[in-house]
Image: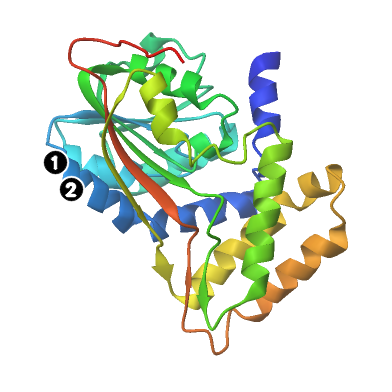
Amino acid sequence: MTEAVAARVRRYILDGSDQDLRRLVSISQASTQMARDAFGRLGVQEGWSAIDCGCGPLGGLAVLAELVGPTGRVVGVDINEAAVQRARAVTAALDLGNVEVVAGDLHTLASAALGGPFDLAYTRLFLMHQPDPVATFRCIADRLRPGGWLVVQEALASPPPRAHPHLDALTGYWNLIGELLQRTGTSPDTVENLPQSAREAGLEVVGINGCFRVMDAQLGFDIHAGTLAAVRERAMQFGVTAEEVDDLTRQLDAVKVGDYQWVSSPFFLDMLLRKPAHGMTPRRM
């Protein structure tokens, strides 16, 4: 692993443990309909080639594989080798023969390793970790054919996840995640500024939506508590006390089974972008 790749791994705040990989699979399952809705609005067709950037152990691979069909092709890319191994096992178990998962840094992987250009690229909870989203957008655009599409689904720093009845611990938890992201080198308004970053990278902003994903309370609180457990060690490295993290985790664990009717995801910015058919013309600011 080069130093540049190692630095990107350090900037990613989650610990990559087996427990965390299971949490990421749960997020993928809970986010399936959000991805399906976006691809449906776009009109993904059989035979397309697609790349899932930062796919983790599942990402949007299963949904994309279904939509592009047996004549299409899906490539997942993730820097975490453990996540890639899990993704390969999951796609094999699901008999997704049109899916390939590649380990490496999207920014430095040779095009030949991925087999583009692609008709469609997808990111979920990936750009929010990037210190230079304009550069990442340009990297993704380089993987697309002229006229190719990019679906972006990233979590805003505010508002925090919601629950009914209200739970203050959700706000404290999401504020802590935002603080850790900033300490790893990302801007506090990275996701809020993604439309502008996309335009600077030469991409056309075709549509912008946003939504919460509402989940069963037990599943939702399990995902949020698991996220806190994943960042515990990194939070302590940045001066957050173990007691603070553990207290928030206990509060979320305590309400998995109780009177809560539902819990939401963070608020997702949902964007549809396109690479100009005439080629890239990045706008310099």
Residue tagged by mark 2?
A: 40
The answer to whether marks 2 and 1 mark residues whose Cβ atoms lie closer than 8 Å is: yes
The answer, for residue 1, to whether it is visible in the render is: no
Taking the image as shown, residue 252 lies to the left or right of residue 189, namely right
- Asked which colour scheme the image uses, the reply is rainbow
- Residue sitting nearer the eye, 239 or 36: 239
Describe the element under mark 1 as helix, strand or loop.
loop
- Residue sitting nearer the eye, 55 or 98: 55
Taking the image as shown, residue 83 lies to the left or right of residue 149, namely right
User: In the image, is residue 177 above or below residue 273?
Assistant: below
- Residue sitting nearer the eye, 2 or 147: 147
Describe the element under mark 2 as helix, strand or loop.
helix
Residue at position x 50%, y 49% in the image = 156
Label 2 – label 1 distance at C-alpha: 5 Å
Percent position (x, y) of residue 189?
Answer: 56, 40
Percent position (x, y) of residue 52?
Answer: 37, 34
Residue at position x 84%, y 52% in the image = 240
Residue at position x 58%, y 33% in the image = 80
